[in-house]
Image (cartoon, helix red, strand yellow):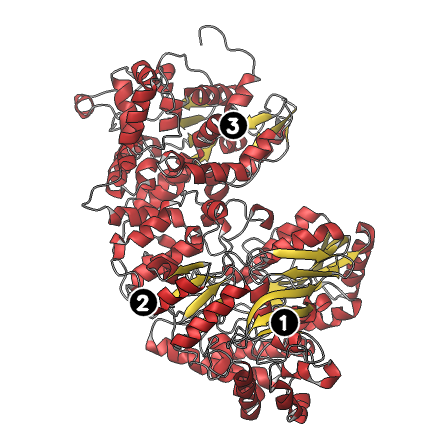
Amino acid sequence: MTDLEADLREAVRGEVGFDVTSRALTTMDASNYRRVPLGVVAPKDADDVAAVLEVCRTHGVPVVPRGGGTSIAGQATGTGVVLDFTRHMNKLLSVDPESRTALVQPGLVLDRLQDAAAPHGLRFGPDPSTHSRCTLGGMIGNNSCGSHSVAWGTTADSVAELAVVTARGQRLRLGQDWAGAPAGLRELVDGELARLRTGFPELPRRISGYALDALLPEHRADVARSFCGSEGTLGVLTEAVVRLVEAPRARALAVLGYADEGAAAEAAAGLLVHRPLTVEGMAADLVPSVAALPRGGAWLFVETGGASESEARARAERIVRAADVLDAHVVTDPAGQRALWRVREDASGTATRMPDGTEAWPGWEDCAVPPRRLGAYLRDFRGLLGAHGLRGTPYGHFGDGCIHVRIDFDLLTPAGIGRFRRFSEELAELVAAHGGSLSGEHGDGQARAELLPTMYGHEMVALFERAKAVWDPDDLLNPGMLVRPAPLDTNLRFSVLPREPVDVAFGYPADGGDFSAAVRRCVGVAKCRTTPSSGAAVMCPSFRATGEEEHSTRGRARLLHEMLAGELVTDGWRSTEVRDALDLCLSCKGCRSDCPVGVDMATYKAEFLHHHYAGRRRPASHHSMGRLPEWLRRVDRVRAAAVVNALASVRPLAALAKRLGGIAPERRIPRVATRTFSRWWEGRNTRGTGDLVVLWPDTFTEHLSPSVGRAAVRVLEAAGLRVALPPTVHLEKPPVGDGRTVALDPVSLLRGRGRVCCGLTYVSTGQLDHARAVLRRTLDLMTPVLETPAPVVVLEPSCAAALRTDLPELLHDDPRAARLASRVLTFAEALERLAPDWRPPALNRPVVGQTHCHQHAVLGDTADRRLREAAGLTGDLSGGCCGLAGNFGFEKGHFEVSRACAEEQLLPSVRQAPREAVVLADGYSCRTQLEQLAGARGRHLAEVLAEALEPESPES
């Protein structure tokens, strides 16, 4: 233990982390930069903050305050001690509706403040797109803005008082009329009044540099306001009094369509006279689907408020009439507005990939110019991009003249980095020529601070340095930011990654087969650090359960990045730090859909486990549950299901089996069906004369829940479809007759019978060699089916998802894999596509339950929603994750997290449901979790529909 670490542990009551994991999680924010800290401290209170500063000053070690780590300019990284305020100093201390203020700690997430203010008809004005995970401390440090800044300004406009601790331990209460000013600050300002009155551009989004003009007498010498945007370089914030604004009772969203972004930019400033709440712009490049948007190639999102829906709509329609648009939509439905805003908010992640899949990066993320000059600036900006052979798609706060853009810089080669520098220098000159600010929202950090002389001149930058010295004479706080900055082309986070592709098992088709590129997908926007009320449907259940960064998708991606870098995590695929962080990943695939950049941590986890345990002893659970299909087939082969069930009911024997199998002692071993689905199938008569569908007998349906398969057959046949099961031998030609029978030749008999398998349990436990063998055998069995047009209906969502994604990505060298993946249909999709005229029985009951994680992330549930609606099953299923997630919730050590995931949304929704409600759960894991934790019986949609059909005849 170093002296610094020992002294910190003795001085503070919060956590002190000098371990590899703690440091690796804070090497990066959402920028292009990376710095490795010495350690991380999570202070309990202001006393802890003061103690950390005293210890670090003694040791000459810098201190970096950090909130949600979503900064885009590099200011939330550092080489000294990082202060993490999200763990303890994250509370809302009070809300005062009378004065319209709130008292907050720096680690409080903005959405928690909004939730508390809403019952009083109030809200915090600024709302960055990261509102579900950014903190008030980070917003004050960056002087953040958000989409409503045309109405409510920047964070500085909403700050009343700030409590800070200076680098030398002085505790100050900052406010107006020089309240809390450190010694020497007033004298500095009084000597530079002329410069301060003339040296700052007039525009709504001027964030760059120190706001020293807020200290002018005509601005009431507002020390708190001048502190905003200082990026943790002047003092450490411990508490803030912030102002709240009245929230409109109703809102309307006018989406205005224009031919291109230039036309939208030219129109934006003219809409401000109508006093809208937002004027946001984006072009078609960033929109996955324009179906919900009016005609055009670019759009303005203009929000209006009112005392009633009709008043808000009237204001929106007035703006539509005043605007010269190609087309427009006005939306007053809150759900419709949220869906449209999600398109805009996800742009910060979507923009990290160009339409052709090329990577794009921040660095010139948020320049701002006077709104009336935005159109001209964008034309010049596009010209500069073209001159350097670069591409980017601008979007952002058009009403404030602030533009976000990710650019396809090559930050991996010396030539590309050189072009990045030259472009940055020329763009700084262009922004200054238009009277703009290098930063209009996210601060300067390392990305732009070096270029501040271009905007302000050397004399003003020298004044910034003098102000920094007044507050922090030892240069202890976040050195290298704003003043005396590091060069903008150093400390790039990509420089440490391997230059050659890493040898991996999966194909990573969206990343050119490069695992490093897949890991680089995580840019740190941290949508994985959200709660259910923040809008993320599934991602990331383990973070929601623990609140720990290492259990977020971003945290795991950071550890994988450091593993590839090899500087901090030094043992590569054998890393215990990465293994432990991935241990609580449920492989729910929620990040595959909810993450704006499509990080697929379930695949990364499988890849890591494959390498980590290569040639080594695996955990018992990988054998007991990872090879579950093999065990269950053996039980069926010797007709031992009844014996297994009897033994599992004897507590001492069950306890022994669980201990040997690495199964959580809190779990009950599920019962094995005494008659498998296939055996039932072999003894029934064929029905249906319509299109042939091949029903996939997944392991769970086959051995654990055959009633689901039986019900699905009934419903599919009732819809007029002809059902067959996959072959169980490797056929040289397609099946004949009714699809049930096959002509066997001697060679086929010698090969023996087999069963198709999606390989899910092998993939989730990282047994990828075995998974490939199983999947190749499955493709051999399915080859005759693939020579017919028959679709493959898969009842278990996780198995369907494995066939659609894991199969073609793992066997990327076998064209049959992609063909089978393209054939996979869910139960509802099969009915909708193949029996469009069939009408399900009318059930007319409410439903409750949860959309399966893999259904949400990979398959989609649109067809399921329509099928439920047609059957009169009313209500929406909850989001989130059931927490069992295949083998995860059964593994020893996972029970508490598994239960916490279920208690987040699923179990409360079931407990609160009316008695007549149908509990739907298409996944076997979800049904098992409901049974074991809530005593509730969940059913597959096929079972619910089958029960309402006419009874089958006895001979069936």
Residue 600 can be seen, yes or no:
yes
Q: Residues within 10 Å of mark 1 (few under 14, many from 20)?
A: some
Q: In the image, residue 852 lies at what x, y percent? A: 49, 36
* Residue 934's disc number: 3
* Residue 2's disc number: 2
Q: Residue at x 53, y 37 (%)?
A: 903
Q: Which kind of residue does numbered mark 1 sit on? A: Gly
Q: CA distance from mark 3 to mark 1?
A: 56 Å
* Residue 433's disc number: none
- Tag 2 or tag 1, which sits nearer the N-term? 2
- Tag 3 or tag 2, which sits nearer the N-term? 2
Q: In the image, residue 271 lies at what x, y percent? A: 75, 68
Residue 263 can be seen, yes or no:
no
Q: Residue at x 32, y 46 (%)?
A: 606
Q: Is residue 711 left or right of residue 841?
A: left
Quarter of the image that includes the C terminus: top left
| Image position of 164 with respect to 14: above or below | below
Q: Is residue 52 left or right of residue 762?
A: right
